[in-house]
C-alpha cells in the first residue's frame, strides 16, 4: 500500500489548524476568565482613586495593571485570602522618577495599607498621622 504524503500533510495541517482554532476560541470565550478580569479592573480603579486621594497632585501619571508604563517597572494585582494586593508606580509631572507603591485592600475594597516610596514632605507628615499610610523613606 502506497501512502500519498501530500494528502497526509494536508490532513495533518488541517487537523492541527482546527485544534488550535478550537483552543483559541475556548480561551477567548471563557466566561470565568472575563469575569475575573472585570473584577481585577474594578479593584485597580478603586486603588487608583485611593492612591490619588493620598498623593493629592493635580498632574500625576500612574502605571498600574490597566495602564502599564514599561519604563516604570512591573506591576501586579494579586487576590489574597483577605482581599487584594496591588503594586504600581506614579510620577508627578514635574519629576522624572517613578515612585513605587504597594497597596492592600480588603474584600470590600477598603484600604488596609498603602506604602509609597516617596520623600515628599507632605507625604512624610501624612505617614506620621495615618496608620494605614507609610512611606519607604
Image (tube, grey):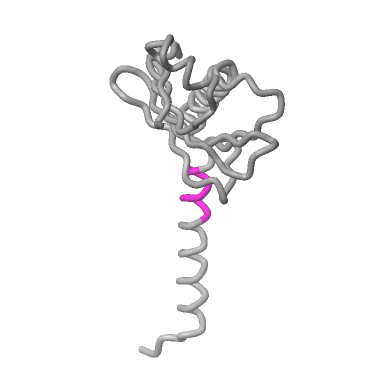
Rendered-image quadrant of the N terminus: bottom left
Magenta span: helix, strand or loop, mainly? helix
Q: Nearer the viewer, residue 41 or 89?
A: 89
Q: Position of residue 23 (x, y in %)?
A: 46, 50
Q: Which residues are magenta?
A: 21-27
User: Position of 96 compared to 41: left or right?
Assistant: right
Please name the residue shown 39% across and 23% down the image: 84
Residue 94, by quadrant, is top right
Return the residue found at the far bottom.
2
Q: Position of residue 96 (x, y in %)?
A: 63, 44
Q: Nearer the viewer, residue 60 or 25?
A: 60
Labels in figure, total: 0
Please name the residue shown 36% across and 19% down the image: 83
Q: Is residue 4 above or below residue 54?
A: below
Please name the residue shown 60% across and 34% down the image: 62
Q: Position of residue 63 (x, y in %)?
A: 57, 37
User: Position of 10 compared to 86: left or right?
Assistant: right
| Residue 26 located within the stretch drawn in magenta | yes
| Residue 64 located within the stretch drawn in magenta | no
Rendered-image quadrant of the C terminus: top left
Please name the residue shown 62% across and 19% down the image: 56
User: Position of 50 compared to 56: left or right?
Assistant: left
Q: Is residue 67 above or below residue 59?
A: below
Q: Nearer the viewer, residue 93 or 30?
A: 93
Amino acid at each position: 500500500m502506497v501512502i500519498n504524503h501530500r494528502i497526509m500533510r494536508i490532513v495533518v495541517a488541517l487537523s492541527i489548524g482546527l485544534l488550535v482554532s478550537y483552543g483559541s476560541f475556548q480561551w477567548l470565550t471563557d466566561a470565568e476568565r472575563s469575569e475575573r478580569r472585570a473584577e481585577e479592573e474594578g479593584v485597580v480603579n478603586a486603588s487608583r482613586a485611593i492612591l490619588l486621594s493620598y498623593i493629592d497632585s493635580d498632574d500625576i501619571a500612574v502605571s498600574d495593571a490597566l495602564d502599564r508604563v514599561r519604563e516604570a517597572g512591573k506591576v501586579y494585582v494579586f487576590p489574597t485570602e483577605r482581599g487584594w494586593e496591588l503594586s504600581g508606580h506614579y510620577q508627578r509631572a514635574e519629576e522624572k522618577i517613578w515612585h513605587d507603591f504597594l497597596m492592600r485592600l480588603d474584600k470590600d475594597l477598603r484600604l488596609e495599607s498603602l506604602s509609597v516610596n516617596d520623600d515628599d514632605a507632605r507625604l512624610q507628615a501624612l505617614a506620621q498621622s495615618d496608620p494605614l499610610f507609610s512611606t519607604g523613606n
